[in-house]
């Protein structure tokens, strides 16, 4: 699926203007709690975009992404709470630190097949969770850490006004992801996803590209973690368990992996739906598992795939396809 | 020396459970080239079924265990039909995700049915310890290791000496060639997932008296998977040896490093093995073919 497909340019511009305008105006119509849910949706969307960049575009399975989010969140929490560092420094630091771990994970990925990468990323997610839980001196273990309010000069952000910080970071990261996907690197990612061997033969530096794929995905995860810490003013290990990693995957699969809109759509559904299904909390995990399975089996291209025509041969003009065939037959 | 022996005993007890799960992982991997992330949940299902049959329906231990294993077999076969077979031609990570989805459905499904209550499994054999040469043992330790070893040997024998076992190994080597010589490949898929589920459930039932039974106890199944990687994922014997080795290693780490970080140690073992020798101790390295 090439990144060039999608709605016509004019519609995309309209969509962007309406979307961003809506995001900026939303607080004036939304009560505080729904606004908090919207903030969480954007944070989840950033983490899901990270999974999408390394998995949907570069084809590198990541089933421990909550580990990267945890690194970002705890970097922010620890630096702000214990060293009184400003949020504006911990945000890039958390992202970069997560990206560093992403590179470490990406290095062995050069030699390993999908199955092994899935295990490495899974193991990584578990290790981060366990360390966060057990290194009590640093992370305060299961009791979690309180995060000071984010300030800018004299101004102290509330969770309502912090929303705007999240919106700005979200828009910047979305714009970066879009440019990234259309860039030389992004095309290299697609080549790796479709066939590693062919990509290598065409001159894609596999080791470098895979390491970058993990680093970029991890950076988005780390940034999401930092924003989460700033938004909720509290971090504890429960927010970064395996089920959260699965949720990020589910957002992508249901929304449409390998598309820019997919993770946004998925994050919206899987942040808002649990809030609406609160009385049926027991069924929510079961439902998201069932949705994940159903989409994998029946709609592997996700919701975005349902709205756009199938890529590849199915979109070819049937007449030209027959011409090719008959020409081949005659030859 | 006595102390080390004590650590070895508890290590082997755990290791035998890991070995059972590891063999289950390896069987599915060899037959269908998929990592089953729902294996730990099958372990949990085995323990839950046995508990429900015994405590709620008043069956004796033996029938409860037999029915629990039969139930696990059926679930394994159903999971293969629902979550693997339709994805035969899908990219490999789609299949991995589908097993993750199944695991989540099993976990939350059990939680819906049984709630959050913690359950203790009534001990089958006397838990009172006795000492042999200064090492404290319980009948439970001995029974767990003995049963696990018998089950493991039975399955390894099954692969070596029965026609069905040959068919499964042939499928593992080359699916198309196996189909050409008359092996029913779909049947092998069903068998593999069924057997793997039974192995996991056996481990779950053996584990049940040692810990509290919760919907999340499947997390321990992951240890089986690390054992399998340590030993060599594509070797059946290797994965069993790896399971035992991991149990011992974990207990040593618990004693000599820190009991809070012993799980971190095991996961680091996983990552180190994958980085330096992905094929494990006994596996054969993967080769890439054009």
Image (cartoon, coloured by chain):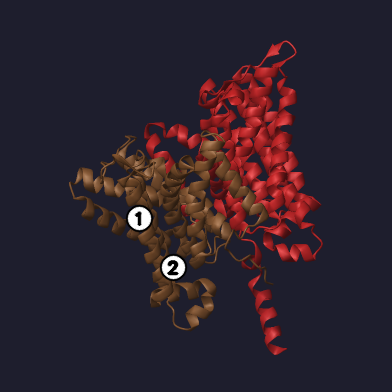
Chain colours: A red, B brown
Counting residues from the start of the chain, the first of labels 1 and 2 encountered is 1
Which residue in the structure is indicated by mark 2? B189
Category of crowding for the residue at label 2, using alpha-carbon neighbours closer than 10 angstroms: few (below 14), some (14–19), many (at least 20): many
- Write the residue at 36% across / 39% down: B211
| Residue at position x 63%, y 73% in the image | A318
Q: Quadrant of the C terminus of chain A?
A: bottom right
Residue pointed to by mark 1: B146
Q: Which mark is residue B38?
A: none
User: The disc numbered 1 marks a residue on which chain?
Assistant: B
Q: Secondary structure at mark 2?
A: helix
Can you say whether B96 is above or below B32 in the image? above
Q: x, y percentage for residue A80?
A: 68, 20
> Helix, strand, or loop for circle 1?
helix
Give the camera-side residue of A173 and B190.
B190
Percent across and percent down for residue B102 are 44, 51
**Residue located 22% across and 43% down the image:** B55
Q: Residue A123 versus residue B16: which sits nearer the camera?
A: B16
Residue found at the very far front of the displayed protein: B133
Residue A295 in view (yes/no): no
Query: As rendered, which of A220 and B15 lies closer to the eye?
Result: B15
Horizontal side of A96 relative to A159 (left or right) equals: right
Q: CA distance from mark 1 to mark 2?
A: 29 Å
The chain carrying label 2 is B
């Amino acid at each position: 699926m090439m990144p060039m497909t999608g709605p016509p340019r004019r519609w995309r511009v309209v969509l962007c203007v309406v979307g961003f305008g809506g995001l900026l105006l939303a607080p004036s119509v939304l009560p505080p709690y729904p606004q908090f849910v919207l903030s969480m949706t954007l944070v989840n969307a950033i983490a899901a975009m990270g999974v999408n960049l390394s998995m949907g575009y570069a084809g590198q399975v990541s089933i421990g992404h909550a580990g990267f989010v945890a690194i970002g969140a705890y970097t922010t929490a620890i630096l702000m709470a214990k060293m009184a560092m400003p949020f504006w420094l911990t945000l890039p630091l958390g992202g970069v630190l997560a990206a560093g771990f992403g590179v470490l994970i990406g290095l062995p990925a050069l030699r390993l097949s999908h199955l092994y990468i899935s295990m490495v990323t899974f193991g990584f997610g578990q290790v981060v969770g366990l360390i966060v839980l057990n290194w009590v001196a640093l992370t305060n273990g299961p009791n979690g850490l309180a995060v000071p309010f984010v300030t800018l000069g004299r101004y102290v952000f509330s969770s309502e006004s912090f929303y705007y910080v999240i919106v700005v970071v979200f828009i910047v990261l979305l714009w970066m992801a879009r440019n990234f996907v259309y860039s030389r690197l992004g095309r290299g990612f697609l080549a790796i996803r479709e066939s590693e061997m062919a990509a290598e033969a065409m001159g894609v530096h596999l080791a470098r590209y895979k390491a970058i794929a993990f680093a970029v995905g991890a950076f988005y995860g780390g940034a999401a973690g930092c924003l989460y810490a700033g938004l909720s003013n509290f971090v504890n290990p429960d927010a970064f368990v395996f089920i959260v990693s699965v949720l990020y995957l589910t957002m992508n699969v249901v929304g449409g992996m390998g598309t820019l809109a997919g993770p946004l759509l998925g994050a919206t559904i899987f942040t808002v739906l649990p809030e609406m299904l609160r009385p049926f909390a027991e069924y929510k995990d079961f439902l998201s598992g069932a949705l994940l399975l159903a989409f994998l089996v029946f709609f592997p291209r996700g919701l975005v795939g349902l709205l756009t025509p199938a890529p590849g041969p199915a979109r070819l003009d049937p007449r030209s396809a027959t011409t090719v065939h008959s020409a081949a037959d005659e030859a | 020396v006595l102390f080390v022996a004590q650590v070895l005993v508890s290590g082997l007890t755990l290791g035998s459970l890991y070995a059972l799960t590891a063999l289950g992982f390896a069987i599915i991997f060899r037959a269908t080239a998929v990592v089953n992330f729902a294996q730990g949940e099958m372990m949990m299902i085995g323990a839950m079924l046995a508990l429900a049959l015994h405590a709620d329906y008043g069956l004796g231990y033996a029938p409860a265990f037999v029915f629990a294993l039969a139930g696990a077999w059926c679930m394994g076969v159903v999971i293969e039909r629902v979550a693997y077979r339709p994805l035969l031609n899908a990219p490999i990570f789609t299949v991995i995700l589908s097993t993750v989805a199944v695991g989540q459905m099993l976990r939350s499904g059990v939680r819906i049915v049984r709630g959050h209550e913690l359950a203790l499994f009534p001990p089958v054999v006397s838990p009172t310890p006795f000492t042999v040469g200064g090492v404290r043992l319980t009948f439970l330790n001995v029974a767990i290791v003995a049963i696990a070893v018998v089950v493991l040997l039975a399955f390894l024998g099954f692969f070596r000496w029965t026609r069905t076992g040959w068919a499964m190994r042939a499928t593992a080597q080359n699916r198309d060639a196996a189909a050409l010589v008359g092996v029913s490949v779909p049947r092998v898929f069903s068998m593999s997932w069924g057997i793997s589920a039974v192995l996991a459930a056996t481990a779950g039932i053996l584990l049940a008296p040692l810990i509290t039974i919760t919907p999340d106890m499947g997390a321990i199944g992951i240890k089986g998977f690390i054992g399998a990687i340590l030993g060599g994922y594509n070797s059946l014997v290797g994965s069993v040896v790896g399971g035992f080795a991991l149990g011992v290693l974990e207990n040593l780490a618990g004693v000599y490093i820190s009991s809070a970080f012993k799980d971190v140690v095991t996961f680091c073992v996983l990552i180190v093995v994958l980085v330096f020798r992905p094929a494990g101790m006994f596996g054969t390295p993967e080769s890439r073919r054009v």
